[in-house]
Amino acid sequence: MTTGSAGFDLAKLLADRGGERYELHTRHLNHQLPRMLRTLGFDKVYERAEGAYFYDAEGNDYLDMLAGFGVMGLGRHHPVVRQALHDVLDAQLADLTRFDCQPLPGLLAERLLSYAPGLDRVFFGNSGTEAVETALKFARYATGRPRVLYCDHAFHGLTTGSLSVNGEDGFRDGFAPLLPDTAVPLGDLGALERELKRGDVAALVVEPIQGKGVHESPPGYLRAAGELLHKHGALLIADEVQTGLGRTGDFFAYQHEEGVDPDLVCVAKSLSGGYVPVGATLGKDWIFKKVYSSMDRVLVHSASFGSNAQAMAAGLATLAVMDDERITENARHVGDLLRKRLGALVDKYELLHAVRGRGLMIGIEFGKPRSLGLRSRWTMLQAARKGLFAQMVVVPLLQRHRILTQVSGDHLEVIKLIPPLVVGEAEVERFVTAFEQVMDDAHAGGGLMWEFGRTLVKQAVAHR
């Protein structure tokens, strides 16, 4: 039976009240977000988006080098994914009955596993942090051990379990007690082995390239860590929530290194096609069979909206586009070009210290300059709050050049570039040209950048 809309008109609602967006957020949601956006001059009103660009009411385009923190791997509103969602809605499937087996989850699992030899089964949830939570539970149950190791400065999510393996104190403060987990330095095999010898470690969870600061695991580390873990009866969990699905120039970032054998892999973000939240935990057959060991345990781990038809359709369409449009290869090619162009500027600008990363996951690091005039300004910013210079670069990139970027973490002098994987040479040229102009201004010894820096210093001091 079909019913009317009961008077609901989405277009009219947005037309009537869309202008209240910042006020509504201030009153009813996280009130600090609009405050922060206004302080930085980021309180823009974007009317629409397509591919790697936003557009305001005047039709001005804004280049997106953030991709919704990596969610928009295919850019915004890819026509193939959009059509797939129209199709799945029009099909009126008997979705989420809880007591049947719909085809789309099985088809998406089959397709995902084809990219990950050695892994056999998939659990579908709704987000990256849920994918990590699943991996933590499965690892603990499968090994019968309580403790999971993680790396310093790691980010694996913000729900309580994933927060327990989060290497950033700023996210953890005030939420104790957390799970009994332990940090080890990224790349330190000795520290890993010392913890494993205690005999209570279920797993190590690791990002092949850390999102915070864009730090890559040293060559050979993931393979050697996996061998150590397996020797001691523990598991390797690869968190590919941000690095997976072509971001780093390989389908999964751990595949850049020969011989890496993860037991569980966490996926999300780009798998959504930018539309419907979806997370996935890929794992070995024996782990799943141990968790789901009998019919009595059939629902021992589940998700109310996991495997819903819209998310599965979006995931299938996303993977089809990745193959058809050679998205992973594009990320490798364009990422190499962007890193090369930016790396050539390190010797030109004394405030620019390093450019690193892989594929289209790139970190631009700033540091203390040599010349006295610049050093005094740098010191002023650092005394107020570490990370202000990187924020000073982010702001004119948006305000003057209509390019959206952001720092890679609190108190870090690093900008992380994670644009949609569909960007090309034109976007590289636009970003590098704008970045050079911003750096020219920063090295000129005055100008609007340093004026804005003084404003940020006042804000930082006032809210200590």
Image: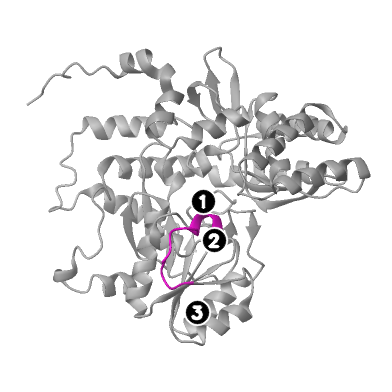
* Figure quadrant of residue 445: top right
Could you say which is closer to the camera, residue 22 or residue 220? 22
**Magenta-colored span:** 168-181
Rendered residue at 42%/19% (across/down): 20
Give the residue at mark 1. Answer: 242
Could you say which is closer to the camera, residue 305 or residue 102? 305
Mark 3 / mark 2, whichever is N-terminal: 2
Rendered residue at 82%/50% (across/down): 368
Q: Are marks 1 and 3 in contact (CB under 8 Å)?
A: no
Q: Residues within 10 Å of mark 1 (few under 14, many from 20)?
A: many
- Please tell me the numbered disc located at residue 207: 2
Q: CA distance from mark 2 to mark 1?
A: 9 Å
Mark 1: secondary structure = loop
* Figure quadrant of residue 44: top right
Q: CA distance from mark 1 to mark 3?
A: 23 Å
Residue 337, given in percent of the width and then of the height, sits at 72, 42
Mark 2: secondary structure = loop
Q: Are marks 3 and 2 in contact (CB under 8 Å)?
A: no
